[in-house]
Amino acid sequence: MEDQKVPGIAIEHVRLLNAHIEMVNSTVEGKPSYNVRLIGMQRVESHDGMVLDLLAQFDVMHGVEKPLFKFTCDFVARYRRRAADSMTWEEFSSGMALAHIIPYLREFVSNMTNRLPAPVLMLDPINAHAMIDDYKKRKVAVESRPADKG
């Protein structure tokens, strides 16, 4: 069995940076539908290479026809390498970082929707790696579209 390298990376915090929540359709009946999508992601390393911030932007109602509300939010997870011989940032996957953010997203969505005149929204389990793959596919599709000449 291979020796596993000790990552030597610590999570410092996960923080909400921005949110927009707005009731837009109070006439929808039944259980509200949602479609959580990662709509933006950025990795930012410090100059000394010891700190990594992963910024993740979410749209809870992405592509939902007649959503009850608009709900977008941005989180950041900050990581610190404990030593220069710790795992490199290239080895530390965005999926792992996103998996740390998702519980904060889940709590924020249920807490905020509990305050709206709408049913509380409880997010199903989310596969962070699949979410990133979907984001990358959508990003490539958008970038490969021919530019409008209008």
Image (cartoon, grey):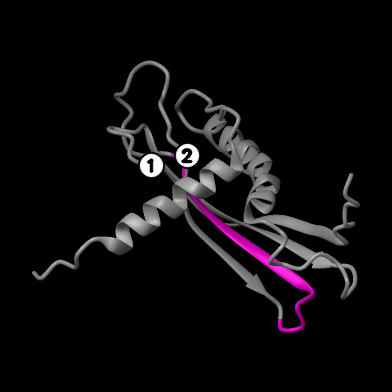
Residue drawn at (60%, 30%) of the image = 125
Q: With 99 as the anchor, is 141 left or right in this view? A: left
Q: Residue reaching furthest left?
A: 150
Secondary structure at badge 1 equals loop
Crowding at label 2, few (<14), some or many (≥20) Cα neighbours within 10 Å? some
Given residues 7 and 13, the one toward you in this image is 7
Q: Residue reaching furthest bottom?
A: 47
Q: Position of residue 21 (x, y in %)?
A: 45, 45
What's drawn in magenta, residue-wise?
47-60
Q: Please name the amino acid that badge 2 sits on.
A: Val
- Quadrant of the snapshot with the N terminus: top right
- Quadrant of the snapshot with the C terminus: bottom left
Q: Earlier in the sequence, mark 2 or mark 1?
A: 2
Q: On the image, numbered disc 2 is attached to which residue?
A: 36
Q: In whole angstroms, how far apart are the C-alphas of marks 2 and 1? A: 6 Å
Secondary structure at badge 2 equals loop
Residue drawn at (68%, 74%) of the image = 45
Q: On the image, numbered disc 1 is attached to which residue?
A: 62
Q: Position of residue 24 (x, y in %)?
A: 33, 38
Among the 4 quarters of the image, the one containing residue 82: bottom right
Marks 2 & 1, CB-CB < 8 Å contact: yes
